[in-house]
Amino acid sequence: MTSPSDRVLVAGVDSSTQSVKVVIRDALTGEFVRAGRAAHPASAEVDPNEWWIALQEAISSAGGLDDVSGISIGGQQHGMVVLDIEGDVIRPALLWNDTRSAQAASDLNEEYKLLHDGQAISDAVGSRLVAAFTASKVRWLADHEPFNADKVAAIALPHDWLSWKLSGSNDLSDLFTDRSDASGTGYFDPVASEYRRDILALALKSDREIVLPRILGPFEIAGRTPSGVAIGVGCGDNAGAALGVGAHAGDVVVSLGTSGTAFSVSKTPTHDGRGYVAGFDDASGNYLPLVCTLNAARILDAGAKILGFTLNEFGERALQAEPGADGLTLLPYFEGERTPDRPEATGTLTGLTLSNSSPENIARAMVEGMLCGLVDAVSQLEAEGVEVARILLIGGAAKNPAIAPIASSLFGKPVYIPQAGEYVADGAAKQIAWALHGSQPHWSAASMECVESKHAPVVMERYLALVNKTQTW
């Protein structure tokens, strides 16, 4: 057993929509050493320098990097960071949940078809474009801020830009990224592992040369900080979570954060022209078919606020109601929706009567509605041939007492809840540990709780009927 003075420490970062978390672990064993965090601005449009300031605060609160050998960043996907020739940020970053680019996505999907004899853009980049994708935001910029579009010399994603800042470089050619995050841009071929510059040119309405981050292997050392700490290539947040939780083929991870995601590690790629399943890459050289919904944890926040409960009280009240909430059904499109692609939609609560209008039924309907969107997401993965042997629930909202038992009743099978952890940051830490050692570190797997409830299929039946009734695309 190594002494504290002999061990090698690594830092993993999760730079998410709401906050940044830094976790420091022993590179060999994965043993937790310390952690820190800081808040991000609550907006869908953020000055990237706010992320940099928050990262410094989080590193400081985690005790600094003086004894750390390597660091790697997992970050929110899709966000568009545009840089000028000097490496300065041109305008605030548009994040994945900024839906202004919905029309731009639709335009790009149709223009690509016209240029390629009806071929869907998903055949080229693994995904049908929606508002979240970087390419859609690039087109929005070209349409609405041509004066800023003309200044663009480089385009980076949040984790790319933060990694570059860590290196201390001002040279655009030093930007780097990995397959997992690049696969969410909409101008990257996840199978060939190369950019589709023709799609970028289509989005920007210009064929001038734009610097894009170099694509590095998942376990490369990409550079060093000015003080000599090795910088890993980093990854997208969902890919980081899959690596951190130790997901294998057959595991579907349902992550309940600001957004809700369902994804699985796969040996084969997907190309869903319907627009449900995004054909992403993972952080280890495989693929990561993924379905993302805009509305997850914040549905619980909204419900607790409406009813005047704490989040725990809200969950406990939901469990006091019967499955199906005595006829109440929620369509949880509070901020529009990404899957299905309904950026202008709003939430709908149906079936209200005098007899069922209780706090318990309303709480139950809100939890069920939010989770039904994720059950549907898993069914879309299955439709693309993804194996679903085990369902893992992670994310902040997964800790709510109502989530696991209600999720099991909706999925009709057991669900597994790994012990609470910062899995995106843990995945990034594992990535840099792998890079430093040259082989996969054998960290202990997270212990898991299994929850199984009686299947309640009528809830999904009513939910899908409401989805179909309000179908707009």
Image (cartoon, rainbow, N blue to C red):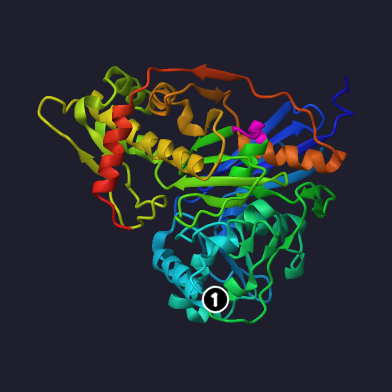
- Is residue 248 rendered magenta in the image? yes
- Horizontal and vertical percent for residue 87? 68, 70
Q: What's the residue at 54%, 29% (across, down)?
A: 392
Q: What's the residue at 49%, 55% (across, down)?
A: 96
Residue 185 in view (yes/no) = no
Q: Secondary structure at mark 1?
A: helix
- Residue sitting nearer the eye, 173 or 321: 321
Quarter occupied by the N terminus: top right
Amino acid at dot 1 = Leu
Residue 178 in view (yes/no) = yes
Q: What's the residue at 61%, 74% (across, down)?
A: 198
Q: Is residue 350 above or below residue 191?
A: above
**Magenta-colored segment: predominant secondary structure:** loop
Q: Is residue 76 above or below residue 326?
A: below
- Is residue 93 rendered magenta in the image? no
Quarter occupied by the C terminus: bottom left
- Horizontal and vertical percent for residue 431? 74, 41
- Residue sitting nearer the eye, 58 or 241: 241
Name the quadrant containing residue 30.
Answer: top right
Relative to 333, is 209 on the left or the right? right
- Residue sitting nearer the eye, 180 or 272: 272
**Magenta stretch in the rendered image:** 244-250
- Horizontal and vertical percent for residue 36? 63, 36
Residue under label 1 = 202
> In this figure, what is the number of numbered marks?
1
Q: What's the residue at 74%, 67% (across, down)?
A: 170
**Around disc 1, counting alpha carbons within 10 Å, would you say few (fewer than 14), some (14 to 19), or many (20 or more)?**
some
